[in-house]
Amino acid sequence: MGGAGAEGGSPWATMNQMLDWLLIGVGDIATKRVLPAILAEPRSRLVGLVTRDPAKALPYGVPAFVDLETALAACGAAAVYVSTPVSLHAPLTIAALRRGRHVLCEKPMALSYPEALAMQQAARESGRILSIAYYRRMYPKVARAKELIEAGAIGRPVIAEATAHDWFYPADGRRAWLIDPAMAGAGPLFDTASHRIDLMNYLFGQPVRVSAHLSTLVHPIPVEDNATVMIEYQSGVRGVVDARRHSRIPRDEFRVRGTAGEIDLTPLNGPSLVHPGGSESIAEPENLHYPCIEDFVGAVLGGTQPRSSGETALVAEWVIHEALRIGVTHRKETEHADEEPSAPGRLRIAPVH
């Protein structure tokens, strides 16, 4: 059968159709998770790859293209997965949407909040689906935690804490784009904190205020190697996310504390869920991207919205860009503290000789 919702056809497909995919960018995440997920999803069919290295398409038996326009004209894909550096997310997503394709884009959405808004506007104007790969929303144990919170298992939730610590310094040049601000936008704030921020938005609703501290403490790189973000939600919940790329001890913690107990999902990428009623083991998917692909395909073929839509991702985008703006401002103030006169509210300590 033909692909669903390609250019010139209906935006929505019937439930008995296949979804034809074009993937842009055959990098680390694409080869380890995204492509295996597309190939395993029974309603999906890979029909092309956009890559600078045509040899990367050989294992998949599909044609390789050097640019999006040529690919869309030749392969007739109805859905596009954008798996490129962040700097290309907005232009490629907008171009695909305007050509009548549905788009699933890697996170974060874009280098800037206005670019992210333009992506969502293109989705609205085209009538096509835009989804962002915040796949942790689809973890079964996250669904269980949300259920427990809404049932009052910990009383009123008041604070959530997440840490994402690891060691990343691309001395060999591999994945070096992640430390290039022109390509990545930021360091762990965009790469790992964004996932936890989106998850807190999913659990607690609308954020209203953000504060942040960013610094480059250990690695000699042009982006931050650590970011600490505090989010205040309309409900009164506060969320704290700490992401670091200079810890040789990996940490993947996620806890929600309430007036009558707490829920511990640590490690977030693991099966354990501890709450006042006991402990549960809820396995995460073998391929963490599979539920995201499955959800997107169901949305396109069924005419519904994905669980991580452009609209929901815009909320996370606002938080991370506010955090970047505030964090950079604080960083500049700190760097020039010795050059500035004392200001009200700032403690100045004289150097000891």
Image (spheres, rainbow, N blue to C red):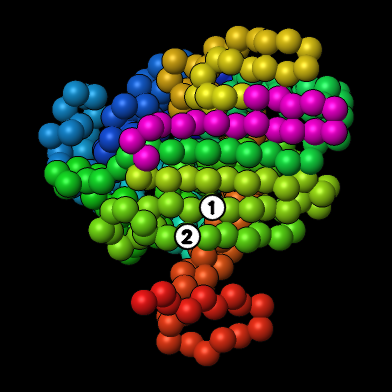
Q: Which mark is residue 13?
A: none
Report the residue at 51% width, 19% height from top. 270
Q: How many marks?
A: 2
Query: Residue 342's x, y, as percent?
Result: 56, 86
Report the residue at 71% width, 60% height from top. 209
* Mark 2 or 1, nearer chain start: 2
Decide: is 148 above or below 177: above
Report the residue at 48% width, 53% height from top. 227
Q: Is most of the magenta stretch helix, strand or loop?
A: strand
Judge by depth and name the residue closer to the eye, 200 or 39.
Answer: 200
Q: Circle 2: is it few (<14), some (14-19), or many (20+) Cα within 10 Å?
A: many
Decide: is 94 above or below 304: below
Judge by depth and name the residue closer to the eye, 151 or 238.
Answer: 238
- Please indicate, yes or no, whether residue 170 appears anywhere in the rendered image: yes
Lateral position of residue 48 relative to residue 271, left or right: left
Q: Amino acid at mark 1?
A: Thr
As helix, strand or loop, the secondary structure at mark 2 comes to: strand
Q: Amino acid at mark 2?
A: Leu
The residues colored magenta run 247-264
Q: For the residues marked 2 and 1, what is the alpha-carbon distance in whole angstroms? A: 6 Å
Q: Circle 1: is it few (<14), some (14-19), or many (20+) Cα within 10 Å?
A: many
Q: Which mark is residue 214?
A: 2
Q: Does 273 lie within the magenta span?
A: no
Query: Residue 105's x, y, as percent?
Result: 46, 44
Q: Which residue is mark 1?
A: 228
Which image quarter is the N terminus in?
Answer: top left
Lateral position of residue 1 relative to residue 141, left or right: left
State yes or no: discs 2 and 1 in contact (Cβ < 8 Å): yes
Report the residue at 73% width, 18% height from top. 275
Outermost residue toward the front in this view = 353
Which image quarter is the C terminus in?
Answer: bottom left
Query: Residue 230's x, y, as percent?
Result: 64, 53
